[in-house]
Image: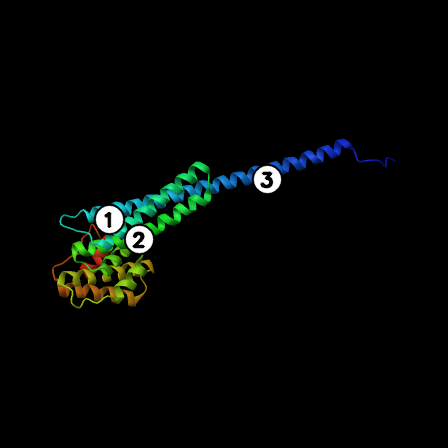
Amino acid sequence: VQTGAANPSAAQAAAATIAGARSAIRQELERAVQGRLASVLQLAQQRLTLAEQEFARLDRSMSTRGFRAPATVVRDTTAARTRLDGARRDLQRGQQNRDASAALNAQQTSDGVAAEVRRILQAVQSMTTGVPPELLAAANDFFAGRYEQAQVKLGVMSGDGLPAPLQLQLSLFRAATYFSLLVHNGESDTLLRDSAMDAVKDCRRLSPSYVPDGAAFSPRFVKFYREVP
């Protein structure tokens, strides 16, 4: 019976198997890392694009004829633009160096800039249109599908002192928001239905002949509005 060292060929085969397994694991990890990096870079690019779109909207509002931006708006806009430039540089570094950390910085900065630009935009729109910034913020939430946030903002607003057309818009967005929440919750919440109907009746009181714009509001809501007794 042989009692010496193990069979060299068997040991070599085992070593080769282990090396192959290690190589396969390393390749799988590399693929996972590269896939994750690609996702991070793509998301960062999307968020940067959204921030740039918000800036384009702000630039259009600030170019309204006769509008002179207050110093605070100019200051905040300049600061936001500087931050956005930094996000572009971070994204470029992430793309060139395959640096996930830089891409994440670009994404986070872009998100912050987009939120800041929306705040500035609401202030500018309020100055150019006379619409209260709170109502503009609620309208933006509504059109973005953030119905709960819109409901909170609309719920704390008062129409006292507002011109009749703005009172109408306040009641209209309340009606549309309650109706959207009703539909989202399966149309079984009688409190939401009653609240939506009451808001429609407020609209009718302010302007009996008014009908919501079908290009801005859903056909279901326009139908609901028309059918409220």
Q: Of label 1 and label 3, which has the lower sequence position?
A: 3
When the figure is inspected, residue 112 is found, relative to residue 205, above or below; the finding is above
- In the structure shown, which secondary structural element does the residue marked by tag 2 occupy? helix
Look at the image and name its color scheme.
Answer: rainbow
Amino acid found under the numbered disc labelled 2 = Glu
Q: Can the viewer see residue 191? A: yes
- Given residues 4 and 194, the one toward you in this image is 4
**C-alpha span from label 3 to label 2:** 44 Å
Residue linked to disc 3:
25
Crowding at dot 2, Cα within 10 Å, few <14 / some 14-19 / many 20+, comes out as some
Which amino acid, by three-letter code, is at mark 1?
A: Leu
Q: Residue furthest right?
A: 1
Q: Circle 2 is placed at which residue position?
A: 116
User: Which of labels 1 and 3 is toward the front?
Assistant: 1
> Closer to the observer: label 3 or label 2?
2
| Local crowd size for mark 3, using a 10 Å CA cut-off: few (<14), some (14–19), many (≥20) | few
Residue at 25% x, 63% y: name it.
154
Q: Position of residue 200 (x, y in %)?
A: 19, 63
Tell me the kind of residue under disc 3.
Ile
Q: Nearer the viewer, residue 196 or 133?
A: 133
* Quarter placement of the C terminus: bottom left
Q: Is residue 229 visible?
A: no
SS for dot 3: helix
Rendered location of residue 198, percent (x, y): 21, 67
Q: Which residue is mark 1?
A: 58
